[in-house]
Amino acid sequence: MSQTAATELSVAEFASRARAWLADNMPRLDPQQPPRNGRDDEGAWQRARELQRRLFEGGFAGICFPREYGGLGLDIGYQKAFDIESDGYEMPLILNVPTFTICCATLLDTGSEEQKREHISAALRGDEVLVQLLSEPSGGSDLAGLITRADRDGDGWVISGAKTWSTSAFAADYGLLLARTDVTVPKHDGLTMFLMPIDAPGVTLRRIEQVDGSNEFCEEFFDGLRLGDDAVVGEVNKGWDVASRLLFHERRAVGQGSEFASGRGAERTEMAAGDFLTLAADAGTADDPVTQDKIGRVLARRMVRDCLVDHVGRAMRTGALPPAAGSLIRLFHSDVTFLEVDTATEVAGPLGVVGPAADEAQLLKVGKRYLSRQTVALGGGSNEMARNVIAERVLGLPREYAADRGVPFNQVRHNRA
Ligand SMILES: Cc1cc2nc3c(=O)[nH]c(=O)nc-3n(C[C@H](O)[C@H](O)[C@H](O)COP(=O)(O)OP(=O)(O)OC[C@H]3O[C@@H](n4cnc5c(N)ncnc54)[C@H](O)[C@@H]3O)c2cc1C
């Protein structure tokens, strides 16, 4: 389907075209053989790139991205219709976060024309994966207090420092890197965002093993990494403006409210209603009214979340709520996920930890997922920081005290190297 054709279609016509195209071109999901979508699996990334290429060639990539950068330039109603149609198909869901919903969305708002033309379209074609390099070993919540430096050297920059918790950086081509370019001004005023090739000389990348055995997260060490001025996103020393946009997109993405995500669900990690019932049957409690109540509570809370995502998303688009309101859906998503994971663990009971061999796969998955339960309270900024943002920037409550406010960064007292 050509881009012009897409813009002339109603949502219903677009959905009908998508239905036919998906049936002919995308692999149907087989519950007996779930696709490889483990984010720490190299093969899953290759597969995602291949599926993304198919979407692009079929004219269904980047539905809400502007046409000049390779998208379709349609509004969120079209994306939602496509998401419903694509539900039973294998989709490149791991490209949604952070490539499309965070990195490309931020480039769209703040990047140069060349950066947008080159990188957004490459990502939509399945040729580039982008990640965010923000958090540092010294802490992630005080992002503006980061210490990785970018020093002027001739007509370029030399980067030194370290980043950590970079989701899927091992599989990426480019990263959005926030670094300090001026230490003589208060912390928010001396930062610059760069778009850097992950495999550049001067970068050492290591994968971090998690408690559940996965190793998707990475840490990067920069020693003599050289970047040109064309790597600057936005303006030098205005990196906080770019980072603020990035955080806005990240909160909406984590809260499941981004129009740039394609396909439904957080990579299908969410348990379906049927999965809960199977779990209860396996645990022998399917007829227990208390178990049924608990499962019902999760499903009802999810419906509330979906309504909240729609409501807050609309209010942010019309300006009725400020961009910081993305923290509302990000926080609620974390609460719902906690309830879901806790309920699944309760329903599985001891079998979620040690089960009879036949039930192991499904039941033990529940126990394993519990190990990474806390990640939703940290990814995209911690729950506490989300509450701070809601208090200060949505409700207008007084700002938290900060000893470093307005103080040049090189005069701030801290115990860092
Ligand atoms: C799933 C996941 C994906 C992630 N992906 C990325 C990524 O791709 N790129 C990246 O750069 N980072 C990523 N991160 C890192 C994430 O951004 C940080 O974990 C987060 O910002 C918190 O930083 P920290 O872990 O250093 O905790 P710290 O900042 O050290 O905070 C420790 C604790 O203190 C609390 N705290 C700190 N300051 C305050 C305050 N002012 N008021 C109240 N409480 C406070 C925090 O809430 C937290 O509970 C990811 C993390 C997760 C879990």
Image (cartoon, rainbow, N blue to C red):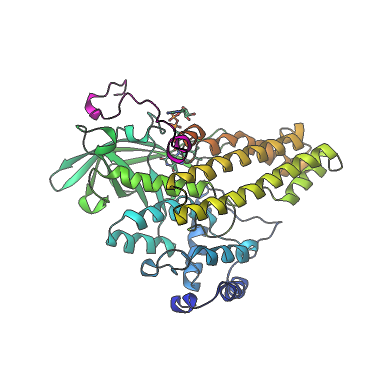
Q: Is residue 103 above or below residue 222?
A: below
Extreme right residue here? 287
- Give the side of residue 18 with respect to residue 384, left or right: right
- Report the front residue among 71 and 310: 310
> Which residue is drawn at the image coordinates 65% and 61% (left, top)?
29
> Which residue is drawn at the image coordinates 51% and 57% (left, top)?
261
> Which residue is drawn at the image coordinates 68% and 35% (left, top)?
342
Q: Is residue 376 visible?
A: yes
Q: Is residue 170 visible?
A: no
- Report the front residue among 74 and 378: 74
Query: Looking at the image, in which quadrant does ligand 1 appear?
Result: top left
- Report the front residue among 296 and 364: 296
> Which residue is drawn at the image coordinates 36% and 48% (left, top)?
175
Q: Which residues are magenta?
A: 389-417
- Give the side of residue 382 with respect to residue 242, left or right: right
Residue 388, percent across and down?
Answer: 46, 33
Q: Is residue 270 above or below residue 384?
A: below
- Give the side of residue 200 with respect to residue 251, left or right: left
- The main secondary structure of the magenta stretch is loop
Which quarter of the figure has residue 392? Answer: top left
Magenta run includes residue 327: no
Q: Quadrant of the C terminus?
A: top left
Magenta run includes residue 390: yes
Extreme left residue here? 154
- Give the side of residue 298 with respect to residue 110, left or right: right
Residue 131, percent across and down?
Answer: 41, 48
Residue 297, percent across and down?
Answer: 73, 42
Q: Is residue 361 above or below residue 137?
A: below
